[in-house]
Structures are given as structure tokens and as C-alpha cells.
Amino acid sequence: MGDHWSSWSSWSDCSRTCDGGATYQERKCLISNSRSRSRSTCEGERFKYNTCNNKPCEADAVDFRTQQCSTYNNASYGGKFFKWLPYTDRKNPCTLYCIPMGVRTVVKLAPEVLDGTRCKPNAYDMCIGGKCWTVGCDHRLDSSLKLDLCSVCGGNNSCLNNGTEGRYHWIEVGMSPCSASCGVGIQTYQYRCRDRLTGNQIPDNRCVNLPKPNGSRKTCFRRQCPPVWKIFPWQDCTVSCGGGFSKRAVRCMDTLRDGRQQWLHDSFCPHPKPKTKRQCNPHICPRWITGAWSPCSVTCGWGEQKRKVICQHQGETFCDGDSKPVVRRNCTTLFSCDDHSNPNYRAENEETGRQQMSLSIRSGRSDKHLIINENDVHKFKNEMLSPKFIVSNWGECSATCGEAFRSRYVRCQVFLPLLGDTVDMADSECYESYKPPSKELCSLEPCYQNFRWQKRGMTACSKSCLGGTQETLLECVNQLDGSTHSPEHCQFAESVAIERRVCNDIPCPQRWRIGDFGECSTTCGGGYMYRKVRCIKQVDITHDRVVQLPNMMCEQPMPLRVRECNTQYCPANWASGLWSTCSVSCGAGVMLRPVVCQRVSPDGEPVDVDEYNCPPSERPVGEKQCNLSACPAVRIKQRPMKFIQINKIRKVRLNVGADAHILHGTNLILKCPVRGMKKKRIAWLKDGRRIRSSRRVTVSRNGHLKIRKSSKRKDAGRYTCVAQGKKADLHITFNNFMDVLQETVQREKYLLGFLADESHGNTSFTIKDPFDRKRRPLQLVLSNWTDCSSSCGRAVRRRNVTCEIITHDYLEVFPLRVCKNAGIRIPDSQEKCDNLPCTKWFTKDWSKCQTDMCVRERYSMKVRTVACIKENSTTVLDDNMCNKAERPLSKKPCKNSLCRAIWTTSEWSKCIGDCNEPRFQTRLLMCMWQGTKKPAGRACGNLPRPVLTRRCHEKCSTGMWSKKLNQVEIGCKDSSDYCNIVHQMKLCRFSTYRTICCHTCNSMAEDPPS
């Protein structure tokens, strides 16, 4: 089973408790072979993410980015402590930028915000692992769902089809100002009507038919309030009339941040202290005043007496109705009315009965002041078919002077045609008309005879010090009830002597002289009013001469000199902070500054609000170009060298330009020295592909590439550092044991010499070793001479001359100029060779196929001239001067039809043999080329061979020929049995054959006679 993923882990804890956080699952790559532990082949992502806890936070919850900035409040920055406020950079929303309060400049406090931080306000997108992830309205990562104009996730704006009812809706626009300018107050969420199509706010009356959300409330605390007087309600008066007292509690209270109140000493609150006691109910007590009884209403029998009863009172306080004395009582004349023969009685009695009947019908009362005239009744008959309020004439005033009343009857009546008169109804039956008043005050002159002047003590002293005056205090008093009235009531009263006297004839104590408050310093957003407060002592009141004293000599605490004013919120405006430093140290860059929509709170602090509260057209720019001095050309300082590791080293530092041969498992630090740009912007490539940071391979802030526990499979290759288009390479290969052994053997004598020199402290030629910056000796390493570059002519031989630092752990090979600059003489790395001149074989063109040079059946030979000549010359040299192994052919076969092998025979020889014995003849047999008549060697081997000997019967003949033979035989002899053939082939012309066949060639030189 190959490498494979483990099962997914359970979901991690959510990064946030509300408003949307991030959670993840992890899986691990399970490697099947321990030898390939560093070469996992699992494909796919190790982590997968999801959102969580998407419910909204509480209304008073602190923004997540604000929380992260506030964690730096207790950390020193530039030697100072700040309160940090959040700032969201549009280009890098997942970097934690904050603004120090009061400085208005943007500072990067962390490279990444915490997972779950919003990328931008009013959006679902969130930062996870320093990357902004798209989040849909369904709270899913990489979801494209958005709220439509109807606030429906993934909707199609269907609500707009409902006319204006679907087009307009309520939106939240922020919090109301704090209800209290100091201390604990209340803020509520405010809502405005918005047009979904245009996105603009419109008058709220467009949304009047839509249910408006109930704005939630939260407490707010803008600043600590100064202590103030807490005034409790007045208690009930000690008396209900006639003048009494009422008390109340007044305490100096301080409101704490949690809303609780603390009772302080009175000196902490501004003076003067509000009154705790006052007069109350000074009016006279109401009472009933009764008049004399009237005569009895009859002259006989039982009748009725009446009297006036009035309430003597002041203001709206009236007498108790339950204690009102009776106004009627029965009376008798003590005369019987039984004598009906008396005409006087009879007439009187009939009249009285008629009056009583009329009164009972009209009013049900017998009071003569309330009797309605008959003319009035007839006047209203036609209009009173429905119930109406009917009033009688006003009666007389209850008094002849002073305060008095007059009254009348007010009845709800209706005219009944059956009775021919009006009758009383309940007041509720006259619901269509207003009931007139039944009582009113009389406008009478005061009863001046009842008023007089009365002494009430002395007036207050005109001065508190340095001698003032006071005089008798007079009040106009009603003698009947003791009530006090205006002086006009005593205009006819007897005058009373007024006494004047000196008072407070003492030096003035020191006191505060308090001026008036000036105008407010601002028109909104919380300003201040100032006034002068001085500690003085008055020495002359007439000319207002004073002596100013130190504040400590007057009563403490000192009255307030400053008072807040115009604490209402100002309209929102754009506010911009300080420009940041240029993004680059040279050349063209950008500068950023925070731009926020703010309104000034009543306590003078700027408060950030949503941007739609400020006019978009007036928004200041938050980014601008900055052009500093021209940047020096970006330059990468390379250090060409070859680094060879021969022993284990924990860490190896290499610069670009190096060719490094490393042992497996070494920790590497690759450096790219750059000038003309910030090192943190250096990028690294491996074999042309950008390197991604991991737990094993990282790029530091100064641009160094760090590799932990390097291996051949993962880390061998070409590394390139890139700096604004400039590139420099560094090559890394991995040595095995044989590579190390070979490098060590080649430098064994130098290594031993180096160690010996090092032990003796020989540092005549030393430099700083780039590896560890220590001074080490330089060595010239010379190899053996190579063979000459050519075996002839001009040639050179070479040897390697390298400038090296040789240690028992590593070797460093530098360019020769390093040793030269150190003062070491560099020997020659090549020299001339002493060679013979260079030669070559020269050939001419092939001849035509030869007719006399047959070599085999139907084949002849072509020939050409081959000569040894000097290079770049036509001078012919001896063949020994050229390489015989490379000599070109001078002959080659070619087709020739004349080259046909045949046996040819010579003529039979004469009989040979002694005359006394059998004799025989012989002839020569030769293989000849038919066309050229030249010997063909063995070319006739496959042809039938003609007979070479035969018997002969020729008689013996002796003569001169015999003599010649004898003479020849005496001189020389043949040393071969084939001399006859030599003679037949006419080879006797060659000296070699003449020597071998001396007898035959000489004897056959001239044929004997026949």
C-alpha cells in the first residue's frame, strides 16, 4: 500500500464565539516506506476550513479587529504607550494595521489578523490564515450568494414587484448620541428609510406603512460627571393653611461608572447649596360665614327660614362642603291655619300654594333668587323639545366688598307639551350642550377698613460687611384672618413709623468673586465656557476696592471656572490622519493615511461612524504617490566559489554565485546580498519555480532562505534569488562517500600541509573565510600536467591551478584573483610542447581499371599515388614521417571482363632420360589471364588440369648440345626442383631466380639444335 491520507480529524474549536469565526479539519500523510519518509506522494490539501458561530454578537460587543488592536495597549511602542484603534487597509485587509489614538498614523502591528476577522466592514468575507476568503450570505466559504435588494440571501429582488411596499425598507444607521453628557446614559439603535433600487436614504414617511424595528438600547458612559446636588421632593407642608413649612433632602452625590451613586461631603458640590426648607400654604384658612335668618315664610302653620352662608377663603382653597352650616330651617308662627273662613288667610294661602307649585315644577327649589321668569320659559318652549341647560339670573354678591361670589341655578330641562311646561332632567341627558358655570367671583373693591400695616421685623442688611443699613419691614395684613396682602390694600390704613439702623459694621471676610461665563468655545461637539473666579477681600464697598488673595484663603472647593456647553453631536465630516512613510526608500512608491468618517462627541472625542454619513464627493484621498531620490540600480553581490563539504557540519552559510557540494542532512542558509532594495522583498526560486514557505523551508525577513535537514531528493538543484528583475543563481549538489574521498585524495598533501601550517600559525597569506568570517590561509592547488594538446606541430599542455581554503571539514575553491589579491604569485597553468612538424598522407585520384593487373576472376585493380607530405605544404616526406596505420590505400579492385583465368601449357620438351632407359617428355602448366597473358596464380584452381608428362620414343642423339650441357653443368647448378617452371614463366630475367636456377637459366639461354 502506497502513501495515503489519514482520516480527517474532528473540527477544531471555533476562532470566535459570535459573528462568524473559522474552524478547520486536518489530515496527515501516512508514508508506507520508512526510507521514503521525506518523499511523501500524497496529493491534495492537508487542511480544509469552514465557518462557525455565525450568530450576531451582542449589541455592545467590541469589534473583533478592535479587540486585536487593544491587546497592544499595554505594549510600549517607540518608548510610549498608546490606545490603539483599528484600521482596515483595502489592499491588505488581512494584515493588522492600527492607529495610535492622538497620533493619526497607520502602524502595522502584526502580519496577520486572527482567523475570522472581517476583510471589510459590512461584508461576510473573512480572513483565514492571512488570506481573505470569499464568504456568501449563506456563511459558506467560496460561496457567491449575496443578499438581493430585498435582503434575501440568493434572492431575485422579487419584493420589488410589490410596488413601493417592497422597494422601501428600514435600515440601521448607527447609534443615537448618548443621552447623558456625562456619566451613564442610554443609546439606542437608529433606523432610516432607504430605497432598495438606489441605495439612498429617503424621508422616513416613505416607510410609514412598514413596521419599524424596535431599536435596542445599551448603556453608554462618555465621561465622569462632576459631583452634583441631588434634590429630593418637598415633603408635605406642616399645615394646610395659615402658613407652615416644608422640607426636602439635598445631598451632594457622585455618579460612578457602573451607575451607582456615592454620597459626598457638601464641599465637593458647587455652592450655593439649594434650599432645604421653605414656607408653604401662607393663605388664610377657609371658613364659613353665616348671615341672619330671614323671617318665617308663613303667617300661620309651618314655614321656612333662610340665611346666607358664604365661604371666606383665599385662592383656590375652599371650605369643606361637609361642614357647611344649613341655609334653611323650618319655622312656625304658632298660629293654626285651620280657620278657612278667614278670607285673608284663604287668599294668602292660595297664592303661596300657587308659587310653591310653580317653583316645584320649574326648579324643585323655593329659593326666590333662582326663580325663572315666565317670559323666559315661553321664549324657550319651541327650542326645548330636546334637553337643554337652562340658567337662572345671577344672584346678588355674597359681600359688599372684598372677595365675594354670586351664583345661579343651572338645570338640564326639557319642555313637555303634555304638561305645557319644562321639567328637570339629569345632567347626563344634556350631552349635546356645554354646562354653564353656576358660580363666579364678584368684582368688588377691597374692604379697606379691614386692612392695616403690621411690623414683621427688619429687612435684610444692605451689606454683609463694612456697615450696611436695615429698616422696619411692614406688611399689609387683613385684621379678620391675619393674611398678608399687597400694599394697595392698606392705602387707607394708618401709617406706621419706620425705624432705620446700622448693621454688619464688621470687616468683610475673604470671598470668591465670580464673573459671568463667556461664550462657548464651539458650536457643537462639546465646548467650554470660562469665567473669572478670584479670591478677594473687600475694603471699600462704595468704591468697590478689593484686595486679591491666594485661592487657598477662600472657602474650598473653589467654584468652577469652566463649564461644558454645546454638547450635542456635530455633523459627521471626513477626517484624515498623518501620511505614512513612503512604501519605498527610493524611487516611486505610495503613502497611505487613514480616512474615516467621524463626528465629534459631546466629550470632545472623535467617534468613527459609517461612511455613508459623510458626503462621498468630499472624501479625502487615502493614497498618493511619493517620489524619492532615484534608487541606485539594484545589484546582487555574488561571490563565485565552489564549496565542498567533506565532514558533517551543523549549519552551512552560502552566498549566491556558489557551486555547493553538500552532505545529506546539513542545515543550509542561502544568502542573497542585495543593494538598492529592501531585503524582505527578495524572492527565491528553485529550478525556476517559486519556493513556498513550509516548516522546513522558510524565507526570513532579511531575505535568507533557510533549509532544515537538507536532502538530495528535495533540495538538490539550482536556486535563484530575484530582486526587482535581477537574478543570481546558486547550485547545490549532494556528495556521496566516493565524491568526498576523491576530493580528499586530490588535496591530501595540501590538507596535511595546511594542518601542519595551522599548527605552527602560518598565516602569511590569509583572508576572511566566507563560511565563518575567520581568517584562514589560502592554498594554491596544482594538478599534474596534461598531455600535449597535439602530438605534432604547435601544442600546449595544461594543469589546474586553483585558489583554495582547505580545512578538515570543507574545501572552498575561489577565483585565482583572490590569491593574487592576497599577494600569492600565480604559476603558469599551461606551457608549450616540443613536437615534430605535423604531416599527413596525400592521395591522387584513382586510375582507370587496369587491364594488366587482374587480381581475381573478372577483377582487376585501380591504383593511385599515396605520399607523405608536410601539413600546409606540398613537400613530400619519407613515409616514416606519417602514421603508417593511417596510410590510405594505393590500390583497390575493380571489375574487368578481360581478367579470365585459363590453363596454358608450353610445348612438350624433348625426350628426357638415358638412352638405355624409358624416356618421357614434360611440358609446363601455367594459369594465365586470358586477356593479359599474365600469370593468374591460383585463379585456375577450379579448372581441369592438363597432363604435364608423357612417354616418348625418340632416339638418343649426342652431339654439340650434349657438349654445351656438360659445359654448363660444370659452371653452376640448380638449387630448386622448379627451375623448369621458372624458365617457362620467363622469370630468369630476375637475378633471384637466375641464382636459384643457375643451370637451367644458363642452359636454356640458347635452345639446342633440333
Image (cartoon, helix red, strand yellow):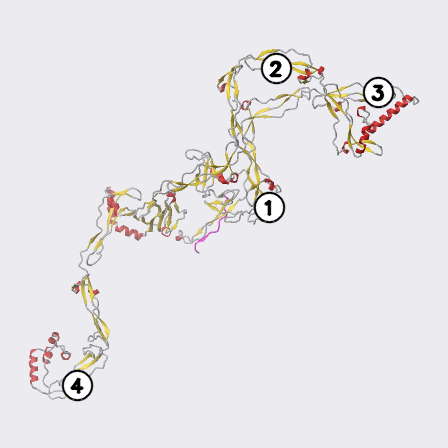
Of the residues shown, which amino acid type is indicated by label 1? Gly
Pointer 2 or 4: first along the chain: 2
- Residue 549 colored in magenta in the image: no
Badge 1 is on which residue? 166
Which residues lie in the magenta part? 1-14
Of the residues shown, which amino acid type is indicated by label 2? Thr
Left or right of 298? Residue 839 is left
Pointer 3 or 4: first along the chain: 3
- Cα distance, mark 4 to mark 1? 145 Å
- Cα distance, mark 3 to mark 1? 86 Å
Is 751 located above or below residue 62 in the figure? below
The percent position of residue 38, horizontal first and vertical second, equals 39, 51
Pointer 2 or 3: first along the chain: 3
Q: Is mark 1 on a helix, strand or loop?
A: helix
Q: Residue furthest right?
A: 341
Pointer 4 or 1: first along the chain: 1
Badge 3 is on which residue? 296
Of the residues shown, which amino acid type is indicated by label 3? Cys
- Cα distance, mark 2 to mark 1? 75 Å
Badge 2 is on which residue? 459
Badge 4 is on which residue? 950
Residue depicted at 61% across the width and 22% down the height: 276
